[in-house]
Image: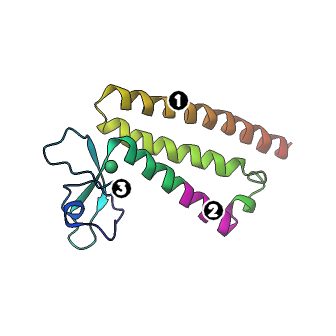
C-alpha cells in the first residue's frame, strides 16, 4: 500500500516494528502485514495482523466518513438522503480491507475474525444495494 506513516522510530521505519503498537518483529512470532511506507526511504512498513491491522481499517473508515460528512457528499444524491448510500460505500470499503487481509492471513483465529467481518459487511452491502435499487426504480416510475 502507498499510505505514508510519519514520526516513526528507526525500528518502525525499517520494518522491524509495528507502526501502530511498536511491537518488535525480530525473533518474534507476531504475524505482520505491509501497511504503507516510510516517507523518507520509501521502505515498506508493517503492522501486526491482529489487532493493529483491524485498527487501521477502522481508523481509515472513520476518516473517510468524517471527510464525506464534511464535504456533504452523503446529501448530494437523492439516493443518499438518509446516508444509506454512504453506508453502502463504507461496507464496500471494509470488504476491500478484508480482501487484503484474507490474502495474507494464515492463522486460524484471525482468519475466522476476518471471515466474520466479511460476512457481516457483505450481507449489509447486499441489503443496502437492494434497498437503494428499489428506491431508484420507484423514483423512475
Ligand atoms: Zn502492532
Left or right: residue 12 compared with residue 90: left
Distance from disc 1 to disc 2, alpha carbons, whole Å, reads 25 Å
- Residue picked out by circle 3: 20
Q: Are marks 1 and 2 in contact (CB under 8 Å)?
A: no
Ligand 1 within 8 Å of disc 3? The answer is yes
The answer to the question of whether label 2 and label 3 lie on touching residues, with beta carbons closer than 8 A, is no
Name the residue at the left extreme. Answer: 27
Q: Secondary structure at mark 3?
A: loop
Q: Quadrant of the C terminus?
A: top right
Q: Percent x, y for residue 72?
A: 70, 66
Residue 125, compared with residue 2, is above or below; it is above
- Residue range corresponding to the magenta coloring: 62-73
Q: Main secondary structure of the magenta part?
A: helix
State the residue at coordinates (37%, 43%). Answer: 100
Query: Mark 2 and mark 3: span between their CA atoms?
Result: 25 Å
Left/right of residue 92 with respect to residue 35 in the rendered view: right
Badge 2 residue CB within 8 Å of ligand 1 = no
Answer with mark 2 or mark 3, whichever residue precedes in sequence. Answer: 3
Rendered view: 8 above or below 107: below
SS at mark 1? helix
Q: Nearer the viewer, residue 42 or 77?
A: 42
The numbered mark, 3 or 1, whose residue comes first in the sequence reads 3
Q: Which mark is residue 119?
A: 1
Q: Which residue is mark 2?
A: 68
Say if the magenta span includes residue 82: no
Quadrant in the rendering for residue 91: top right
Percent position (x, y) of residue 48?
Answer: 31, 46
Give the alpha-carbon distance from disc 3 to disc 1, as whole Å: 26 Å
What residue appears at the point 68 percent right and 49 percent down from the top-left corner?
A: 85
Give 98 or 7, whichever is nearer the viewer: 7
Amino acid at each position: 500500500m502507498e499510505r505514508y506513516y510519519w514520526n516513526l522510530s528507526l525500528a518502525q521505519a525499517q520494518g522491524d516494528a509495528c507502526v501502530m503498537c511498536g511491537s518488535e518483529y525480530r525473533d518474534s512470532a507476531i504475524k505482520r502485514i505491509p501497511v504503507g511506507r516510510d516517507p523518507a526511504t520509501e521502505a515498506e512498513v508493517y503492522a501486526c495482523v491482529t489487532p493493529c491491522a483491524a485498527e487501521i481499517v477502522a481508523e481509515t473508515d472513520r476518516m473517510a466518513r468524517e471527510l464525506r460528512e464534511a464535504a456533504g457528499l452523503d446529501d448530494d444524491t437523492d439516493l443518499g438522503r438518509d446516508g444509506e448510500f454512504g453506508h453502502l460505500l463504507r461496507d464496500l470499503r471494509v470488504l476491500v480491507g478484508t480482501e487484503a487481509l484474507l490474502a495474507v492471513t494464515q492463522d486460524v483465529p484471525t482468519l475466522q475474525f476476518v471471515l466474520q467481518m466479511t460476512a457481516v459487511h457483505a450481507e449489509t452491502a447486499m441489503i443496502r444495494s437492494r434497498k437503494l435499487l428499489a428506491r431508484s426504480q420507484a423514483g423512475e416510475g
